[in-house]
Image (cartoon, helix red, strand yellow):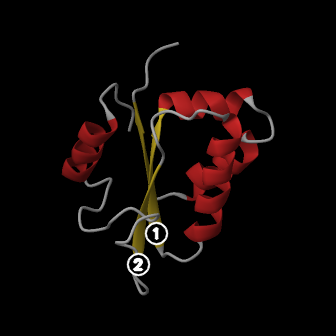
């Protein structure tokens, strides 16, 4: 799903559309528990450095194997940064392809 909305609003729309599981916490927060079948990986809206984004992409890829399914919420800006950095692109592509759903927020025609 693509939307120009902020991340929180996009998440609520994703829940309403059945693209985001409502009872699952962020995979990188305290709500993560052993035995969860699903995770929601949420990227920040802005990154100070491209390496910070790459580390998050890498971590989410590593954690994704723990779950039967997972969803990704990511800003259009984060996608642009990843595609502008050739070493990040394949890692992000791997994560997005494996996801059950992807919600891109703050996306705009370019």
The x and y percentages for residue 78 are 55, 34
Name the residue rendered at 72%, 26% in the picture: 84
Q: Residues within 10 Å of mark 1 (few under 14, many from 20)?
A: some
Q: CA distance from mark 1 to mark 2?
A: 6 Å
Name the residue rendered at 57%, 50% in the picture: 96
Marked residue nearer the N-terminal end (1 or 2): 2
* Residue lying furthest right: 87
Left/right of residue 66 with respect to residue 59 in the rendered view? left
Which dot marks residue 69?
1
Instruction: State the residue in front, 35 or 28.
Output: 28
Q: Is residue 97 above or below residue 88?
A: below
Left/right of residue 19 with respect to residue 29 in the rendered view? left
Instruction: State the residue in front, 2 or 5.
Output: 5
Q: Are marks 1 and 2 in contact (CB under 8 Å)?
A: yes
The x and y percentages for residue 109 are 47, 14
Q: Quadrant of residue 35?
A: bottom left
Which dot marks residue 31?
none
Q: Is residue 105 above or below residue 71?
A: above
SS category of the residue bearing label 2 = loop
Left/right of residue 64 with respect to residue 70 in the rendered view? right
Q: Is residue 102 above or below residue 64?
A: above
Q: Residues within 10 Å of mark 2 (few under 14, many from 20)?
A: few
Residue labelled with disc 2? 37
The x and y percentages for residue 33 are 39, 81
* Residue lying furthest bottom: 35
Instruction: State the residue in front, 6 or 46.
Output: 46
* Residue lying furthest front: 48
* Residue lying furthest left: 16
Name the residue rendered at 45%, 35% in the picture: 45
Q: Which quadrant would the N terminus be assigned to in this image?
A: top left
Q: Is residue 105 above or below residue 38?
A: above
Name the residue rendered at 33%, 65% in the picture: 25
């Amino acid at each position: 799903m693509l939307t120009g909305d902020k991340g929180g609003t996009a998440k609520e729309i994703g829940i309403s559309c059945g693209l985001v599981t409502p009872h699952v916490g962020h995979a990188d927060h305290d709500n993560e528990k052993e035995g969860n079948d699903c995770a929601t990986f949420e990227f920040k809206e802005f990154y100070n450095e491209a390496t910070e984004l790459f580390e998050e992409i890498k971590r989410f890829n590593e954690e994704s194997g723990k779950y039967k399914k997972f969803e990704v919420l990511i800003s259009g800006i984060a996608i642009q940064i990843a595609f502008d950095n050739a070493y990040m692109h394949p890692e992000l592509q791997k994560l997005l392809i494996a996801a059950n759903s992807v919600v891109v927020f703050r996306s705009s025609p370019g």
